[in-house]
Image (cartoon, rainbow, N blue to C red):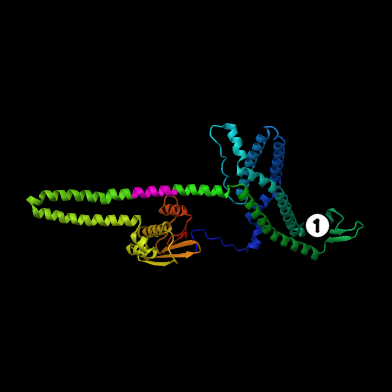
Amino acid sequence: MAYGFPEPREHRLPAALRAPIEARTWRELLYLLLNLPMGIIGFVFTVTMLSLGAGLLVTFLGLPVLALMLAGCRGLGVVERERARQCLRIDVAAPEPLRRRPGQGFMSWLGGQLTSGASWRHILYFFVHFPWGVFTFSVAISFFTYGWGLLTYPLWQWVFPAYTDQPGLQLYGDGNGNGWWLDSPFEVAMTSVLGLLLVLVTPWLIRGMAYVDRGLVAGLLGPSRLASRVTELESDRGTVVDTAAADLRRIERDLHDGAQARLVALAMDLGLAKEKLQEDPKAAATMVEEAHGEVKLALQELRDLARGIHPAVLTDRGLDAALSALAARCTVPVQVSVDLPGRPVPAIEGIAYFTVSELLQNVSKHSGASRAAVDLWRSGDRLMIHVVDNGRGGASTGRGSGLAGLAERLGAVDGVLAVDSPAGGPTTVAAELPWRT
């Protein structure tokens, strides 16, 4: 099932024949060739500064030198991340900033550098990357030059008899005029075939080495997993706080504009009916009857509001009954299928309910669909939600849309929302939530 990702382009050539001329191969080859000079620069700088700093540790100057080494490696890390971004198409975020105490100036910077785990990971990167850079440069340049050189051998084989005393490329010679030269048509053809094989293999070898480089850059030059998780949790906390505040504002607005206003009007009507009770009992009875109708409407609004906060049927009977009741109120016929072995924690259950609720509201208001279907099931440790309708399509999770806000809510609990809604429909929305019991 597609979730809004672009369809891959169809190519006439198979991947094995297309790889040697693809832009990706040339970008990654450039990256591997630059590994050698960048590895030398990083390694020489690191070793020099580390040796100098360690030697000066007997004095106070050792610590500033080590801090300068760490700061310099961070600067080189910026270059390496940008190089990986341009050539390897991997976007690695900058590592976590230094922890500095305000108001302490140089000493704060010095302590921040020396105690930063990210800075020391940069040191490790340049120690590891130097031998790896030598290896990748040697392998990449050798396979690339030998492959294309042998493949094109029939085009430049004439150089040997024209400008040297040899009939072709020499593979073996004893210095006495005896040897083996690639000069016969069969040997020239086999040389070209061998070159073709090397040309076809080289891109995949390059990609394999590039994957190792991606791992080194992401693992050693980016933020640590702990720092990334802390940042993610801080963002999720902000989302949860904003969502809770928005819900409170919505409840306050609904109470103020709905039930509260209706109850105020009801109190005024009953006051008027009380005044007319002695002088015009019939008019008072009519006003009381109207007030009774207003009470029913106010109660219905309060029930709807309470259901919007947390429906009682969800607490009492779970998602199956709650979603069936939700589908019954939808303006579009909805088929509901819930296959769950048990019940998740109330928080996840509530999020699942309101996710389906908002999606069905979108179906009712915007899709123009004539039918919809909702499926829920458990897959491993995940609660899966699948909502599809046959409407006009065009839904997206772009900034400012309701689906974008829903995606943020799900992300706050490690959930995922994916939308596939081509123009003309149908629209398919898939959501995942962690299953917690």
Secondary structure of the residue carrying tag 1 is loop
Is residue 249 found inside the magenta-colored segment of the image?
Answer: yes
Pointer 1 residue: 158
Q: Is residue 85 visible?
A: yes
Does the stretch in magenta take in 163?
no
Three-letter code for the amino acid on which mark 1 is drawn: Trp
The residue located at (35%, 64%) in the rendering is: 327
- Region of the chain picked out in magenta, as a range: 239-250
Q: Is residue 22 above or below residue 49?
A: below
Magenta highlight: main SS: helix
Q: Is residue 153 left or right of residue 5?
A: right
Picture coordinates of residue 83 (x, y %)? 63, 47
Q: Is residue 43 above or below residue 211?
A: above
What residue is drawn where x is 30% and y is 50%? 254
Which residue is painted at 65% across and 36% down in the image?
68
Instruction: Say few, some or many: other residues with alpha carbon within 10 Å of mark 1 (under 14 / 14 to 19 / 20 or more).
Output: some
Given residues 276 and 341, the one toward you in this image is 341
